[in-house]
Amino acid sequence: MVQKVVITCAITGSSHTPTMSPYLPCTPDEIAAESIAAAEAGAAIVHVHARNPADGNPTGDPAVFMEFLPRIKQGCDAVVSISSGGGTGMTVEDRLGIAFQAEPELTTLNLGTMNYGGYPMIEKFKGQWQHAWEEPYLESTRSEPFVSTFADIEYMLEKIGDLGTRFECEAYDIGHLYTLAHFLDRGLVKPPVFLQTIFGAMGGIGPDIDNLIFMKRTADRLLGDDFVWSVLGAGRFQFGLVTTGAIMGSHVRVGLEDNLYIGPGELAKSNADQVAKIKRILGELSLEAATPDETRTMLGLKGGDRVKF
């Protein structure tokens, strides 16, 4: 049987800045259009952050999210996964406001506090910044970690879980799998667990294939049959890692949040271009992209008719 592979597309994120690519969607119009186009290209899940439409600065403001969430829902049938990661400097309350208001099918759950280092990108773009916030924002990642404590995780699982929202559980390192297993054992995480394993982000596990195998083997041992596995590769490692993951039986994530390029030295002009590329690769491997409804069944989601946007 042909295995159905869920393609997630992460539309804009909070780590890249507008100077890095003219194709990075920042306004509600751009985020909505890019999400719908990614879904039309084959993405079953679109993973979204919000940005200040005036300057592209990441924001957790629910009002900005609500400028594009209804339009995505009206324009396609993709599952919408709303980030709870926000951006550097946001409080937990800032990051979760939209999840409480929108009650999405999916929201992200970062499985631990980590040093998410974006500051090495400063040197490449120094003197070219379009907006005053960009360099200080990247510099802040040198000294300010992304905070996700055990108490934060418990709060999310209990309060947001009560809304019928499920979680895209993000594991940036091996220890995060043990944290996930802890909450699964306590019954706060409900199977099937959607596990997004992330490779190549500075501060997390590296993009080596050995690490991919190690993460999968550890997840199998700790989580058994209770998880649905997906792979994300950061930057230039994106397509090699997600293709390897797909060969090993994983689902895949692409998008401009994770990688601004479509090939060596060539900026991706849209999220849809990356979705189309990985869908072609999957086809060459005799793998088929899952539909949104097939994805909802795999992940036990409540359905788009039960969200509040």
Image: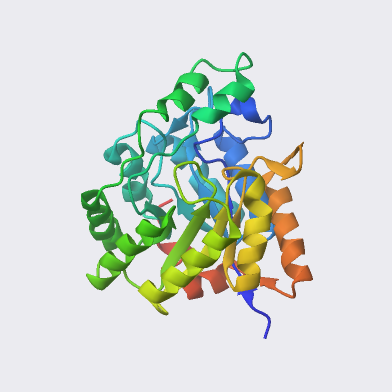
Quarter location, residue 156: bottom left
Which image quarter: residue 283?
A: bottom right
The answer to whether residue 40 is seen in the rendering is yes
Image x and y of residue 285, in percent: 74, 72
Residue farthest to the bottom, as pictured: 1
Q: Is residue 109 left or right of residue 48?
A: left
Image height of 132 relative to 85, above or below = above
Residue at image coords 68%, 29%:
22
Residue 202 vs 80, above or below: the answer is: above
Left or right? Give the position of 307 relative to 67. left
Q: Where is residue 58 in the image (x, y as percent from the top left)?
A: 46, 32
The residue drawn where x is 73% and y is 49% is: 273
Residue 242's image quarter?
bottom right
Q: In this rendering, does residue 164 appear at all?
A: no
Seen in the picture, residue 110 relative to 280 is either above or below; the reply is above
In percent of width and height, residue 7 lies at: 61, 62
Q: In this view, does 88 lie to the left or right of 228?
A: left
Check the picture and name the quadrant holding the N terminus: bottom right
Judge from the rendering whether residue 280 lies leftward or rightward of residue 155; answer left or right. right
Instruction: Give the x, y percent position of residue 64.
Output: 45, 35
Q: Nearer the viewer, residue 33 or 226?
A: 226
Labels in figure, total? 0
Please give the name of the residue rendered at 51% of the width and 46% of the height, measured from the top-left corner: 48
Q: In the image shown, does 193 or 244 lie closer to the viewer?
A: 244
